[in-house]
Amino acid sequence: MILLIVLTLTLLIIAYLKDKKRCFRGIVKGCKMFLNILPALLSILAIISILLYLVPQEKLLLLFGREAGLMGWILAALVGSITLMPGFISYPLAGILVKNGVSYPVVAVFITTLMMVGIVTLPVEKRFFGLKAALIRNGFSFLGALMVGSAIGIVWMVI
Amino acid sequence: MKNYLKKNYFDFIIIALFIIFIGVSTIVKFKPGVAIFQINFVSFVKEMIAFLPLLFIIIGLFDEFVEKEKIMKHIGEYSGIKGSVIVILLATLQAGPLYGAFPVAYILWKKGCSIRNIFIYIGAFTTMKIPMLTFEITFLGVKFSLLRTLISLPVFIIIALLMEKILKPLNFEVNDGK
């Protein structure tokens, strides 16, 4: 937290010295983005608060923890592929999952599919790349996310 | 303000319902409701609301000072590995959801980017955005964030190479999305 405050202040000072106007514009832009994401963030936190109460930690671990094995990975990959969530929200959410005992590789699979695979956005992607290329890209990305998860799992044990 | 309410009306309904639920729970001393609010919600919000404004100020400054247009202008002139490095650089400087990357992919295609570099761009855009990395480090730690980023890099490069191999014989083209 202290590091983040120092970093932000340093960047602000540099930006201010470089160009006052753009520094101010940058701050306004950042605040606007924050306000835009705030309602979605609060509503997701409300839903997650209820869900985490209903699904106790032991259940969550059974689904996504160390013992869940492959099913936990597939489940995380599917949820990540289907849902559409901006990174501003998915990272705080992933942080909550880790604190509740979900393993890092599973979180990596969830985040990577969330970012790379978009089933909901497939119609948009189709318009740019064509259906075939869009399907292939999403398929490869799904497998790629599982690879990223496994690699993190292996490296995590080594380091 | 009106626009703001309109755009986020669904979220506001959920928040309003949640507030009513918590309020009623507190009055009638419904234990699960009180626990949901005090144990889960309050601690989540406390943790995030402290970090988020700072992170967004960093992202705002980043967006204002990094001149992406300059990079875009010359992107078609580079080919091969140099071109790949530049599209990755461009992608890491951006922010936003996946569907925001497709129009940029179209512009890159128009400027002469190869199939491989188009998909390297998409891959980098989805996994290595620097503004998002500040979020990731804050909530998941440096070790995880760096590991995930470094591991994702070869994975999406392989995906891009495979895409090129498959799509090149098929007369693949990026369309303008209309």
Image (cartoon, coloured by chain):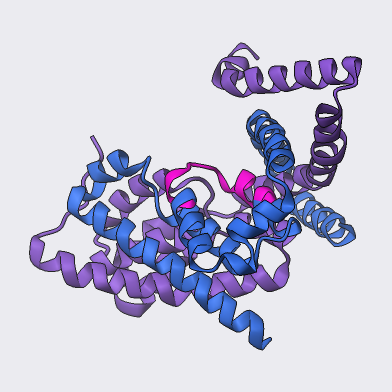
Near-viewer residue (A152 or B55)? A152
Q: Which residues are magenta?
A: A80-93
Relative to B3, say whether B111 is above or below: below
Q: Is residue A148 visible?
A: yes
Q: Position of residue A2 (x, y in %)?
A: 90, 59
In this rendering, does residue B70 appear at all?
Answer: no
Q: Please identify which colour was used for chain B in the image.
A: purple
x, y percent for residue B88: 45, 67
Q: How many marks?
A: 0
> In front here: A6 or B43?
B43
User: Can you name the residue that lies furthest to the top here?
Assistant: B2
Residue B150: % across, % down: 55, 75
Q: Is residue B178 magenta?
A: no
User: Along the line of sight, which residue is nearer the eye, A71 or B78?
Assistant: A71
Horizontal side of residue B67 vs A23, given as left or right? left
Left or right, residue B43 beside residue B136: right
Give chain A's shade: blue
Classify the position of the C terminus of chain A by image quarter.
bottom right
Magenta stretch holds residue A89: yes
